[in-house]
Image: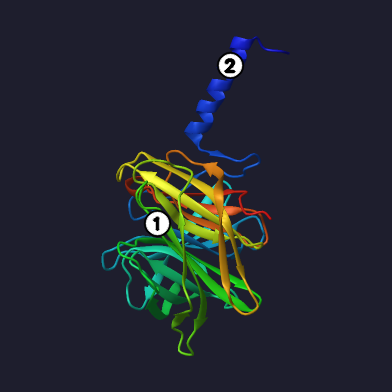
Amino acid sequence: MKLPKLQRAAWSAAATALLTMLGTTQAGAAGTWQKVGEDALGGVSGIAFEGRTADGAGVHALVVHDSKRTGQKRLSRITHREGSDDVSPITWDGPEPSDLEAIEAIPGMPSEYMASASRGIVYRLKVVGGTATVVDYAPLPAIGEGDDFESFALVARNGNLAALWADRGAGADRPATLYSAPLTFAPWGQPLFGSVTRRAYRAPYPDAGATRHISDISVTDSGRIIVSSAADAGDDGPFDSAVSEAGRVTVSAAGRVRVTLAPSPTVLGTFPRYRIEGVECLAGSGEALLGTDDENLGGSVRTAPFCGA
């Protein structure tokens, strides 16, 4: 049946409004937002994929919280399935960080992770059961004036390891600075960074005055750099965010890290009402697990198909 022109226009406007209200993603997106925290201590500031559930229908992930006071939870484990999430706290054993913002599994080192705090301290962790033990920690190299870090990602290629992290930036006057460097570990466990490169990055969305141009980073199996960007007007919102393809990264056989940013980043999905601070490509699939830190409104997670080749 062919609708009259005015009816078609009205239907289109209503559909657009509904998508904006719910948070839009590209065609074929799977998943809906599911609550994993009810208050400011339950937000998701970063995500690391642990593995699939035994039946393959869900995923286990570690999430960090941006707690700043002694004794508050720093790390939790989420078992995510469509329609339900189980959340359990992880005991932190070692020097207690302030304001953790990112976490990433170390490729080739089972049960080992790196977690990053906003002021640029990275912690190497061993996670066994319900305990995360600090193996060692170190500052990020080449920290710039005013840098505030919310992201950290690792890439393994050609037998070499590289790290990507970013100062989040702030609005039109301060783009994000995306850093990259080779990474090795000392025999006693300390992270050791090689020569650092920097790239400026501006998010295509959101375009609010206080936009955090990079609030997290993940890298696909083919080297696509996937980033989240976010904006907020305070601890009660309103929030807005997006996930975009920022460019590509390669690591040569000699260990040289090369980051190429897109002249016009591709917006993969926009998410009004949510502040995404965690994006993690799930190994073996094209899915990303997204997490939000919505301050007083808590935290939520969902999947979206952003990590395919």
Mark 1: amino acid:
Arg
| Residue 7 position within the rendered picture, expressed as x and y whole percent measured from the top left | 60, 12
Residue 220 visible to an observer of this rendering: yes
Please say if the residues under marks 1 and 2 sit with CB atoms less than 8 Å apart: no
Dot 1 alpha-carbon crowd within 10 angstroms: few under 14, some 14 to 19, many 20 or more: many
The quarter holding residue 308 reads bottom right
Residue in view at x 36 percent, y 47 percent: 171
Residue 108 versus residue 53 in the image, above or below: below
Q: Nearer the viewer, residue 296 or 208?
A: 208
Residue in view at x 67 percent, y 12 percent: 3
Nearer the camera: disc 1 or disc 2? 1
The quarter holding residue 146 reads bottom left
Name of the residue lying farthest toward the front: 263
| Residue 290 position within the rendered picture, expressed as x and y whole percent measured from the top left | 51, 52
Name of the residue lying farthest toward the right: 1
Q: Say whether residue 171 is left or right of residue 226.
A: left
Q: Distance of mark 1 from mark 2, alpha carbons?
A: 39 Å
Q: Nearer the viewer, residue 193 or 284?
A: 193
Secondary element type, mark 2: helix
- Residue identified by numbered label 1: 168
Secondary element type, mark 1: loop
Residue 129 visible to an observer of this rendering: no
Residue in view at x 49 percent, y 90 percent: 187
- Residue identified by numbered label 2: 9
